Amino acid sequence: MERRSFLKMSAALGCAATVTGCNSSSDDANVIPPQPPVTDEVVNWSSCLVNCGSNCPIKVFTKDGIVTRVETDHEVEDNYGLHQVRACARGRSLRQRNYAVDRLKTPMKRVGERGKAEFVPISWDEATSIIAEKLSAVYAQENGAKSVFRSYGSGAYYGFASNACFNRLFNLNGGCLNAYGNYSWAQQMEAAKHTFGTGSTAGSSTITIEDSDFFLGVAYNPSEIRQSGSGEGYDYLQALQRNNGLEVVMIDPRYTDSMLGKESSWLPIRPGTDAAFAEAVAYEMINHANFDSQSLPFVLEHSVGFNKQSIEDQKAIFAASDDATKQEYAKVMNSDENYQDYILGQGIYTDAKTPEWAEKICGISAEKIRYIAGKLMTAKAPYIVVGAGVNRQANGEQSMRALYMLSVLTGKLGTRGASNGELPSMSSMSRAGIPTGSNPVKESISFFTWSEAINHGETMTARSHGVRGTDGLDTPLGANIKFILSASDSSLLNQHAEINKTADIFRNAEDLFIVSCDCWMTPGAKFADIILPDTSWLESNDLVNDSYASGSLGYLTAMSSSVESMWDCKSMYEAAAMIADKMGVGAAFRDGKNEEEWLEELYQSTKANSNNINVSPAFPATYKEAQKIGFFRKNMNDNHVSLQSFVKDGKPLSTPSGKIEIYSAELAWRAANWDQENSAQNPTGVKGDTITAIPQYTVTWDGYEDEDAKQDYPIQLAGYHTKGRTHSSYHNVPWLREAVEDAVWVNPMDGAKHGLSSGDKIEMYNERGSVEVTVRITPRVAPGVFALGQGAWYNPGNKRGSTGHIIDEGGAINSLTRYQPSPVAKGNPQHTIRVAIKKI
């Protein structure tokens, strides 16, 4: 069956689920128009604002102030380009989430041990007074502003009443410690920056896949992580239908929903070995008959670092520059460390990166590696894309850069249908948000190192921890974090690495004060000193755009509150304004406007943005009128081709050399100047935590080749995103827990080896923690690899596990992950896990 026929059949079967009556014969179904379950309903537009990248619109039906049902967009004919934006099961379960039993109802103050969830209700006046007093006391200390931190939170992508309101509050009082990077893309952003001078999301638009003649996806899974009816996953399926003969090769430890018959072949790979696979493909490409005539001229013209001479030439340019930074680069550049010699095993390198070498490591056969290399070399427009799961490994910077190299070696970048390995470029409509003002604090830490900065921020430096904004490499940050504001944020505990260690930091930090602002009693909220109950999306007026991964269609929702704010909940804007009042900056915070006036001003700014012209329907005059319409869309016609302006138009890249950097002078400088936990100066340090100027496969802690860890913890555990949650959001919706089982996937071979059957309960454990999970036997995961969906809520029970830790009965994978910032990005390596198991 052709792919186009398969995809159309799948769509038809999906539609069949909505048919309410049919004949028993083969005649077409008799469609009975659905009747509304409740009459005389009021309809409002809201949005699902979790961090999946889509912000899907939601139609909310209410009667007598109660939400009766939730539907999604079907306002227009479903013609691709201005198509319907249909929410997935998560957005459609917002009624259940809004009325969840763990909704926070009133401000609360901790009275018991931190983490025990022992609180008493208090008034908003008391809560905001306590917060203002604590915050003022921290500001009064030396370097006080650097002790104030808003932890990374992406649980609500609002436009107005967002967690940015707290940044506005802080900046009016002296600022706060900044953070760079994020839990999703930290290492790939550094990899792309030091290769292409981009931010890791500048790959060719998904729509251009229609012009590709070979597709290679590594850990690319848009059908699950971007499953909106107008997201990247939808664009991907549309592109496959238009390019029905396209050969699609998917590489992943799991057989994901982005495959399921839509791929030509699935090659399971061992977690963390992607760089070894990439280097063997590169070896074959360099030795291909077409390389010297087809690829080498492109590589030599557009990149630095392929061979010894290109590094010598660039070194001379930097040395002659009047730029002090480039002169520093020239001092550390070593042309012996060139990519060609490394791959071929010549010069200072002794081992060639052959397919046979890689096969033993990554588990993909040498034959398949040669096949992929041949396809990349003979294809006219090969589309390569690397999913973010690769970058969340130990030293994921290396794996990402190694895979990016394949696009360079094809010599076809800048061609429509080809891409450079980065995530696809996405356009979106623009929307104005509440201004946060200027932060006088210049220093910033990695988003991931905040838990370490609670006790060691005073001594953290650029050299040791990648601190930015300090004077030189060895000037310390000079302050520990003493005040944390966590808003729409599960990275406070659940999404951060090594939950048990983080919880201990919280318990033992006597001078730390934590405020949690959320709608539900999350695992992190249980560790707060003050809890502020936020309003839900269905209770909110706001203005939101289509976020960052909505595909080719841009859209904007003018949200209107479907129900009154329940109990004693207040929006983040109201909460921040009340604290501002107590700190004497309330007037400056409000800027003379109430919520309605703020939204009107932001709407007018949004309406005037040139990016939003030709929206359908046209924007009305006022925000209130826009709320009545609710939803606006625009075909963004995004046909971005990665590196086209560089290759075709000669526009320099934002790298130090202006070219593609196979050899990164900046990374060579960091290797010479930053502390590395595995280097010649520290050879007994953390395995694999090293920086090199060219991408190199490294044997890392807890990786496939870590023989030390393998003895006690023989199983590689892969984390992945499930359809039933966005990160940890929506975990508390029973509907979704029934629809998407939280079970660990086990290959039948491993099931037989360990005596496991579907439905068995096991303890998975390592030295960092233990989790209790249900087994699901399935051939959809590679042998030797167990796979567990991330984001389940941490729920410690009463039993001790095999390594002495309380068993987490919630199954949060971060009970097992390691806090070990990566060497370049200082980012999270939370997909690198080894465990042992025991039947319960």
Image: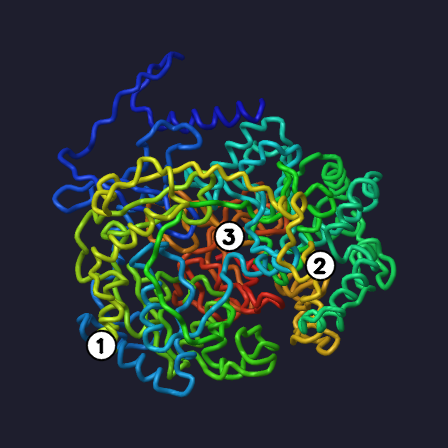
Give percent across and percent down for residue 650.
67, 48
Question: Based on the displayed image, in which of its 4 quarters is residue 138 positioned?
Answer: bottom left
Dot 2 amino acid type: Pro
Instruction: Identify residue type, mark 1.
Output: Lys
Q: Alpha-carbon distance for marks 2 and 1?
A: 52 Å
CA distance for labels 3 and 1: 45 Å
The answer to whether marks 2 and 3 mark residues whose Cβ atoms lie closer than 8 Å is: no
Q: Secondary structure at mark 2?
A: loop
Residue 299 in sight here? yes
The residue carrying pointer 3 sits among few (fewer than 14), some (14 to 19) or many (20 or more) residues within 10 Å by Cα, namely many
- Closer to the chain start, of discs 3 and 1, is 1
Pointer 1: what residue? 582
**Does 821 sit left or right of 102 as displayed?**
right
| Residue 610 locus on image (x, y percent) | 40, 46
Badge 1 marks a residue whose secondary structure is helix
Residue identifier under label 3: 788
Q: Which residue is mark 2?
A: 695
